[in-house]
Image (spheres, grey):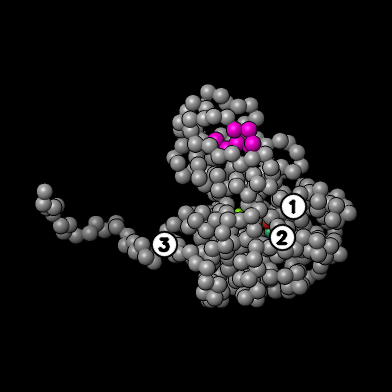
């Protein structure tokens, strides 16, 4: 049959021109290109061992503003400055307490962020107006190579829109920012898979664990030889809102198996080593906390893409090794606030 649809006479006025070649993310392994991108004040998604970060030059206010804008993150939520090695910490912190040095020596490079008193020249958009700065030396070899080549600090909050699932692969980042021309440095799948543990060590305050990570509280206390407080105290630790890391699909966790749902093909399942046969898609993340953490966000991305009615997550055991996982699950399962 001949194709005889009439040609449109004029484009409707409300059509926005959309050039797919300039508005798609691109994934690269070209380190020089990535360093150039950062030096010219642009954003770059970079791998770390925890999650992928949305990186920008931490000394460039305009570049930092682009991070908040693209993520749609409130500017009251401070950013972590990522460094190539611990010797750069004194370029950002006005004072490095002895306890901070102990933790740096034992845990850097690695998934630990330290909140320390900030030097006056640190951008207050990075610290959300506070006189403290959060620092981390990531362990991922590609992150380290990038930071070394760049030569200074990079802010790098998770490369996702505010409150959605943190990305643990270049493909997750591309999915989050499908309509932006973001450059993504590919470093494979993140090995740790959950955001860093955050410890604050501020003058006149007790050492505090502001965020649980896979470097657990007991291990940190053992290294410090001192207990960590768990409440934020006088430290302003935003980024702790109840709904976070959340898929678009309604998600809940269970300790008591909702048996009837096993027959529902539109229910997805995340198991913690004790999978039951289900009609809907399922991922067994295993009963090992490290393996579970490394796979959690990828499982949420995978199931969220299937347009399911519900995602059910089997709760892991209530032990210290699972503290960081429990904390992420409780936020992923929070119902969306009514508008
Ligand atoms: P992320 O979103 O993973 O980059 O982590 C940023 C989080 O680190 C923030 O939401 C805060 O909880 C914490 N943080 C960063 N900078 C500071 C700071 N100066 N003081 C207290 N907490 C901070
Ligand atoms: Mg985040």
As drawn, the label of residue 331 is none
Marks 1 and 2 close (CB-CB < 8 Å): yes
The image shows residue 69 at horizontal and vertical percentages of 52, 61
Task: Name the residue: 60% across, 36% down.
Answer: 271
Is tag 1's residue or tag 3's residue first in the polypeptide sequence?
3
Q: Nearer the viewer, residue 152 or 66?
A: 152
Determine crowd level at label 3: few under 14, some 14-19, many 20+ residues with C-alpha closer than 10 A.
Answer: some
Q: Which mark is residue 24?
A: 3
* 3D distance between C-alphas at marks 1 and 3: 36 Å
Residue bearing mark 2: 110
The mark lying in front, picked from 1 and 3, is 1
Q: CA distance from mark 3 to mark 2?
A: 32 Å
Give the mark, 1 or 2, whose residue is nearer the N terminus. Answer: 2
Residue 120 within the magenta-colored segment of the rendering: no
Query: In the drawing, does residue 192 fall left or right of residue 183?
Result: right
Q: Is residue 314 above or below residue 234?
A: above
Q: Secondary structure at mark 3?
A: loop
The magenta stretch spans which residues?
269-275
What label sits on residue 215 in the rendered view?
1
Q: Tell me which numbered mark, 3 or 2, is placed earlier along the sequence.
A: 3
Report whether residue 4 is seen. yes
Q: Quadrant of residue 159?
A: bottom right
Mark 1 falls on what kind of element?
Answer: loop
Quadrant of ligand 2: it is: bottom right
Question: Residue 123 placed where, x, y %?
Answer: 65, 70
Residue labelled 2 has its Cβ within 8 Å of some atom of ligand 1: no
Query: Residue at left 73%, top 73%?
Result: 88
Q: Secondary structure at mark 2?
A: loop
């Amino acid at each position: 049959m001949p194709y005889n649809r009439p040609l449109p006479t004029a484009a409707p006025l409300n059509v926005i021109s959309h050039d797919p070649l300039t508005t798609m993310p691109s994934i690269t392994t070209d380190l020089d290109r990535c360093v150039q991108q950062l030096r010219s004040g642009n954003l770059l998604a970079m791998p770390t061992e925890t999650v992928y970060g949305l990186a920008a030059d931490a000394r460039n206010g305009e570049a930092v503003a682009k991070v908040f804008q693209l993520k749609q993150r409130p500017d009251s939520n401070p950013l972590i400055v990522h460094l190539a090695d611990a010797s750069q910490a004194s370029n950002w912190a006005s004072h490095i307490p002895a306890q901070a040095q102990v933790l740096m020596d034992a845990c850097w490079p690695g998934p630990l962020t330290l909140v320390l008193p900030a030097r006056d020249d640190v951008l207050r958009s990075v610290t959300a107006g506070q006189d403290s700065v959060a620092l981390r030396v990531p362990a991922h070899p590609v992150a380290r190579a990038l930071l070394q080549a760049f030569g200074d600090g990079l802010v790098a909050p998770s490369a996702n829109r505010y409150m959605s699932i943190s990305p643990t692969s270049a493909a997750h980042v591309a999915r989050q920012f499908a309509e932006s021309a973001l450059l993504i440095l590919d470093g494979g799948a993140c090995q740790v898979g959950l955001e860093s543990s955050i410890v604050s060590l501020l003058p006149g305050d007790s050492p505090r664990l502001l965020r649980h990570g896979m470097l657990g509280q007991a291990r940190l206390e053992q290294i410090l030889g001192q207990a960590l407080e768990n409440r934020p105290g006088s430290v302003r630790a935003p980024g702790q809102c109840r709904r976070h890391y959340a898929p678009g699909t309604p998600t809940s966790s269970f300790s008591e198996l909702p048996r009837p749902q096993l027959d529902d093909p539109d229910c997805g399942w995340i198991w913690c080593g004790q999978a039951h046969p289900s009609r809907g898609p399922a991922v067994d993340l295993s009963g090992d906390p490290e393996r579970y953490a490394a796979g959690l966000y990828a499982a949420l991305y995978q199931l969220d893409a299937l347009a399911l009615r519900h995602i059910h997550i089997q709760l892991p055991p209530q032990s210290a090794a699972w503290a960081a996982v429990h904390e992420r699950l409780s936020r992923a399962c929070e119902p969306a606030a009514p508008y």
